[in-house]
Image (cartoon, rainbow, N blue to C red):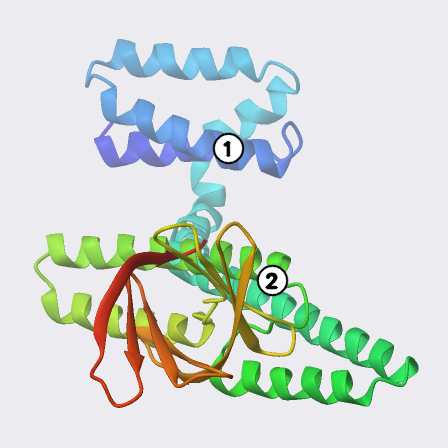
Amino acid sequence: MSFLSRNIVSLLIVFLIPSLLPAEEIIARVPIQCRLLEGWDADRNSWRAAIEHSDFELSEGASQTKQRSNHPEQNLSQVMMILAYAEPNQGKNRKSDLETAQQEFKERVEAAMKSIDELFEKEKAIAIKRGNTHAADLIERQRERFKEKRILPSVIRTTHFEKEIVIAVTALQKAYHSEILESTRGGNKAKASWLETKAYNEISPCLFDGRRTYIREGGAVYAIQPDHSWLEVKNKGKSHVRFHEAARKSDYIELKSKTTDVRARLYNDRVSVKHGYYPWRHFKNGRWAQ
């Protein structure tokens, strides 16, 4: 018996026993039987021993099983249909890890955006109910700022929102990194570059500006307030200086004192100050609080 014939007979043993095994168990046996075929010797004794072992495991309803096994040509077309269509369909319907990550990213971001919008509505309704129209207007302005410039608001709590966004972005970045690494190893640099651009375009809308608290060397702290002003607290809370936000750039936020002609720029690693017409100068080191 040729090797191809032995393969077909073995597959018949696995597939053509619907009266004895449920479909899930039949499918589960296919990889095992195929792996066994690869290690079988050409000797007829090895073939016979394997068949006897399979018959022993499927002893219930043996007469029906043997009848089908002795006449494989009766169901050969059915087996060939299974072999021809089962695997391609499985591959077609299976999502890649990146596609799965993209779907999860989309769902998580949509849920987070919905939750923060509900918070805006809730806080605005409370302000209106209390007759505080100024607070209601401030909430609405910060909501528009959040939507247009992706700046996190200071009038509502955003801890849960930030956590969900970080989880979503991190998971998608990991999936993209894996795909990019695989393309690079395979020598497909063009695809790797395309994936990097695609990842940036997909993730960048969800990178929100959360710079709201700054710690300066010496113990001073700058913190944004609910009314969008900034308060510098120093000397262990004994001194307070009020600022308003004059500019917000990618590498710094510029503050201007409300009472004096003093400006401060809060960088990722330092604070620069400016008095009147004098040029900017380094003041002290500092960092954004996480």
The reply, left or right, for residue 6 in relation to residue 167 is left
Task: Find residue 135 and report its horizontal and vertical position in percent.
Answer: 75, 83
The foreground one among 96 and 252 is 252
- Residue 269 visible to an observer of this rendering: no
Q: Which residue occupies the extreme left position in the image?
A: 187
Q: Residue at x 54, y 33 (%)?
A: 26
When asked about the image quadrant of residue 187, the answer is: bottom left
Q: Which residue is mark 1?
A: 28
For label 2, the residue is 161
Callout 1: SS: helix
Q: Which mark is residue 112?
A: none
x then y, percent, for residue 269: 27, 59
Are the residues flagged by discs 1 and 2 in contact, CB closer than 8 Å?
A: no
Q: Answer above or below: position of 87 versus 230.
A: above
Q: Which quarter shows the N terminus?
A: top left
Residue at 67% over, 72% down: 155
Side of 281 relative to 108 (left or right) = left
- Real-space Cα separation, disc 1 to disc 2, in angstroms: 43 Å
Neighbourhood count class around disc 2 (C-alpha, 10 Å): few under 14, some 14–19, many 20 upward: some
In the rendered image, residue 58, in percent from the top left (x then y), is placed at 57, 18
* Left or right: residue 128 compared with residue 245: right
Tell me, yes or no, if residue 209 can be seen here.
yes
At a point 55% along the width and 27% down the height, the residue shown is 67
Task: State left or right for residue 69 relative to residue 136.
Answer: left
Say which amino acid is labelled 1. Ala
Question: Which callout, 1 or 2, points to the residue nearer the camera?
Answer: 2
- Secondary element type, mark 2: helix
Q: Counting other residues with Cα less than 10 Å from the Cα at mark 1, is it few (<14), some (14-19), or many (20 or more)?
A: few
The correct choice, above or below, for 42 with respect to 237 in the image is above
Where is residue 150 shown, x and y percent of the image?
49, 78
